[in-house]
Amino acid sequence: MKTTIDATPEIAQNAPVNPRRRVYRPNAKYIPILATLVLLLAMYIGGLANLAHFDDPRVVVNLFRDNAVLLVVAVGMTFVILTGGIDLSVGAVISLTTTLTATLLQGGWPPLLVLPLVLVLGALLGSGMGAVIQYFKVEPFIATLAGLFLARGLALYINQESIPIRDKLWVTLSDLRIPLFDGVKTTLIAVVALVVVLIAAAVLAWTRFGRNVYAIGGSADSALLMGLPVARTRVLVYTISGFCAALGGVLFTINSTSGHALQGAGTELDAIAACVIGGVLLTGGSGYVFGTLLGVMVFGLISTIINFQGDLNAAWTRIVVGVLLFGFIVLQRLVTRRAR
Amino acid sequence: MTFLKNRLFWPIAILVAMLIVNVFTSHEFLTIHDGHLFGTLIDIIRGSAPLMLVALGMTLVISTGGIDLSVGSVMAISGAVACLLIKDLSDQNAVGAVLLIVAVSIGVSALLGLWNGTLVAVVGIQPIIATLILMVAGRGLAQLITDGQIINVQSNPYASIATGFFLTLPVAFLIAMAAVALTAVLTRRTALGLLLESVGGSPAASRLAGIRARRITMMVYVVSGAFAGLAGLIVSADIKSADSIHAGDLIELDAILAVVIGGTALIGGRFSIIGTVIGALLIQTLTVTVVGVGVPPKATLLFKAVIVVALCLSQSPVFREKVFGRFKPRPAVRAEVTA
């Protein structure tokens, strides 16, 4: 501030009056999300310029199919992080859901009973952790770590092997193709993931519950003093995260028509990283579901490009993700520091 | 009845209970073979060494209000560096060269810790995210070092880090104990521990009080990295190879758990080294006991979850108040202090 006035006093005086001098300045709260969008576009354009067949619209459409599970889980994680918490159990809940679904279906349970059952189970696990966090003041990190051990332990206890799913409904859903345009088709799970994103964005933007989530993340004490239902909101947020993780597990079983207890290991950190890349602040109170969507797309595009490139191995994928994560966090840090 | 209120009472009670179970269930609890101590008890203290080292570094990091998620990846890198260098030695059994390589690996790990510390203290990134970067990228680096393979080495001096015995006790355990003793002396016999807790309580206030908060924050991440590197060497020496994918997998969560069981608060500002040692022993004993009792190993995580929930609830003041509070006469006036 001081330097601009000292260096260019005339411009500084004229700036508010002269319309030609007025530059578009986005609201500071949108800067992280815009930065992600710009990087995503730059990556896509870079891919178009350098890689053959990258201009196929299927590249974009498949991003949603390949990352549907991560997307759904990351949406749930967004709610939790917005309140200033963290949920380490989501990967384990995916494991539990895929194993349980596959085992029950193999045992001949009706699919229309299995589906709601596993979703409710995920939600219940989440609300249990939320209750422990809210009512016994256990750190979210520790409470959800216990949830991780519990869910992964249950999954391993049920079955350690990969279990194929032969159920008719699951196979039908897995084979279902939804035509979009010009012969480009997508799968059911991509559509479900996108619907989840839209619902979550609407809930956060337009409902009282959404506003409470932001308020708790800003300051739980102030929210309490304002008379907001902090306890209910916080428990609900973990319930949503548990539900989303279970839904992610179901989507996984539909995609692969199998269940495995080790599936989903590490998804929690991918989801947290996607949120952070998308501009959701880990301290809570700031961020958008669409940012998380962009974060997941960044993750997906990195692996797509690495697949197209063909000569980079898995080790490089991790390193590139780490470097990008670093770049984003530093950028975010600079942006938020200036905004203050 | 004051000992019942001690934070470490329940962890120690559970630890002792599990050890007693082991006396009955294990084939040999504690015997002497060829001048060495052998048995389940020795297995427990030998097996707990890597976790103890990692948890020790984690304790210091958490005492400053931070967290270090990258320890598992640092372990993988340290093991990979050591095995890569040892494999190229003309004589893999040369003690001097192996010691030098061990020092290099620990140095590399300390540098990785410095990277974490710089991100946290200088750039000002949240610790959980700053260390998440190295957690993600580090395993990739380790895979790159080993070229995606498992590097096997045939070095007896290297293997003795994990499997050797000295004064009838396992070398790995002695290394961990030396680290514990050194840390305890440095933090409790000098002002360092006080400074750490001060930085954990409030970095800004301690800076105003003349404490170099930044330097102290960086130092704890360096120490955490170096200890993780040492733990990585023990794990890799135990299997005489570098497994960049599985070395130290999920150990960060176990380490945090050990720290929390030991009564160190995750928000920082206070820490207990002896608590962490007991926490690490408890986790390792739990793993050994569950298998020893005859429960299938896959159920270990379930037991862990139950113990975590029980211990954390027993340490939660709100839970104590709600569950045990009604049996006590309430004071007439009670000041409500919300954290």
Image (tube, grey):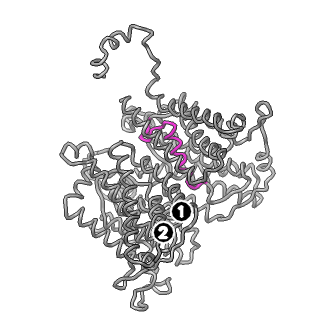
Query: Could you tell me which secondary element the residue under label 1 belongs to?
Result: helix
Compared to residue B48, the image places residue A223 above or below, namely above
Q: Between residues A128 and B52, which one lies in front from this camera angle?
A: B52
Q: Which residues are magenta?
A: A264-285
Label 1 marks a residue whose chain is B
Where, by quadrant of the figure, is residue B230 drawn?
A: bottom left
**Residue behind mark 1:** B146
Give the label on residue B83, or none: 2
Three-letter amino acid code at disc 1?
Answer: Thr
The residue shown at (21%, 48%) is B211
Residue A283 x %, y % = 41, 40
Left/right of residue B192 with respect to residue B135 in the rendered view:
left
Left/right of residue B143 with respect to residue A61 in the rendered view:
left
Disc 1 and disc 2 on one polypeptide chain: yes
Q: Are marks 1 and 2 in contact (CB under 8 Å)?
A: yes
Residue A244 x %, y % = 60, 45
Q: Quadrant of the N terminus of chain B?
A: bottom left
Three-letter amino acid code at disc 2?
Answer: Cys
Residue A114 x %, y % = 71, 52
